[in-house]
Image (tube, rainbow, N blue to C red):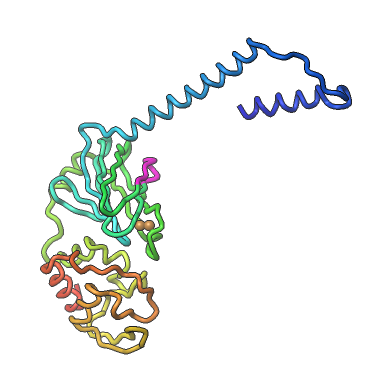
């Protein structure tokens, strides 16, 4: 359309240039055939475009009946996936060629669940459930991004879709979750702690968990610097009321986990962090 319009415009501008026609005159007042042509043709084109747009919109919106459901929850700054049998993971595992319906929500602020490879994106909104579906045509690993700026760890809110053959997926789904001794790490994963705190000493948004217990740290408490030794009480306070002591050099961005972690999980995490090693 652009080429047609521009070509016609240039042709007419040259043909009816001022040199040849110094004075403008109306050649004809009204032409019904012409009016009809330039009304009907563009209308048909626009309706056709609407039809294709609407059809593909509907296929995005209407989730196939046999879709497998996965609950997706977003939080600052990680993703968690829960499957129909209660299994959870921090990567999204799906069988190849099968429709997957994601039921999306957020624990804190607005995030956006985005899988570029499958051309799907949907906001994750606190207090509300949104959904999308996709079907992965090939096995492999594909990025999942957060596509809504959600704070300092936004760019690190990345995980992946792992597309596996149906049989492998079913085996994975049935597998016992983490073995006993790794449970604490699984909890740290589940509550999103590891998005900002590393286990191996790497500096992320927050301080690392490596060799944390017993370490002396400089914290800022109500605007004043002080040095404290990391003990269980400090760890607990940092989880439930993270704003009270901010470790020097780190942004005060951690959300409170008060009423978000069941007591027994909190105990488990504290025990792990106090133990110092895995
Ligand atoms: Cu979550 Cu950006």
Q: Residue at x 27, y 71 (%)?
A: 199
Give how far across and how far down residue 239 sits, in percent. Answer: 23, 73
Direction from residue 61 to residue 258 in the image, left or right: left
Residue 198 to residue 45: above or below: below
The magenta segment is 115-122
Residue 253 to residue 57: above or below: below
Direction from residue 218 to residue 43 in the image, left or right: right
Is residue 116 highlighted in magenta?
Answer: yes
Please identify the quarter of the rendering in which residue 18 is found: top right
Of the 4 image quadrants, the one containing the C terminus is: bottom left
Give how far across and how far down residue 74 sits, in percent. Answer: 29, 55
Give how far across and how far down residue 20 sits, in percent. Answer: 88, 22
- Viewer-closest of 199 and 10: 10
- Viewer-closest of 21 and 209: 21
- Viewer-closest of 98 and 230: 230
Of the 4 image quadrants, the one containing the N terminus is: top right
- Viewer-closest of 175 and 102: 102
Rendered-image quarter of ligand 1: bottom left
Give how far across and how far down residue 173 sits, in percent. Answer: 16, 47
Direction from residue 244 to residue 42 in the image, left or right: right
Q: Residue furthest top?
A: 33
Q: Residue at x 17, y 71 (%)?
A: 269
Residue 213 to residue 118: above or below: below
Please identify the quarter of the rendering in which residue 264 is found: bottom left
């Amino acid at each position: 359309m652009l080429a047609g319009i521009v070509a016609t415009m240039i042709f007419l501008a040259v043909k009816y240039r001022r040199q040849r026609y110094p004075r403008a005159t109306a050649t004809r007042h009204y032409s019904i055939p012409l009016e009809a042509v330039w009304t009907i043709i563009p209308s048909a084109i626009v309706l056709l475009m609407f039809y294709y747009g609407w059809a593909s919109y509907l296929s995005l919106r209407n989730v196939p009946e046999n879709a497998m459901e996965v609950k997706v929850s977003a939080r600052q700054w990680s993703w968690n996936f829960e499957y129909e049998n209660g299994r959870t993971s921090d990567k999204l595992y799906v069988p190849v060629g099968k429709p997957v319906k994601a039921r999306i929500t957020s624990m804190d602020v607005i995030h956006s669940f985005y899988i570029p490879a499958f051309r799907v994106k949907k906001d994750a909104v606190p207090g509300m459930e949104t959904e999308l579906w996709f079907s992965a045509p090939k096995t492999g690993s594909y990025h999942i991004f957060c596509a809504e700026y959600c704070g300092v760890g936004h760019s690190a809110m990345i995980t992946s879709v792992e597309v596996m053959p149906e049989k492998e997926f079913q085996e994975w789904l049935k597998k016992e979750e983490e073995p006993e001794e790794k449970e604490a790490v699984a909890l740290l994963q589940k509550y999103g702690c590891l998005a900002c705190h590393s286990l191996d000493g790497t500096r992320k948004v927050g301080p690392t968990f490596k060799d944390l217990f017993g370490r002396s740290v400089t914290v800022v408490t109500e605007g004043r610097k002080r040095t404290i030794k990391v003990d269980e009480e400090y760890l607990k306070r940092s989880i439930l009321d993270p704003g009270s002591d901010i470790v020097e050099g780190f942004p005060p961005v951690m959300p409170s986990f008060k009423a978000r972690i069941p007591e027994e999980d909190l105990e488990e995490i504290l025990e792990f962090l106090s133990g110092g090693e895995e």
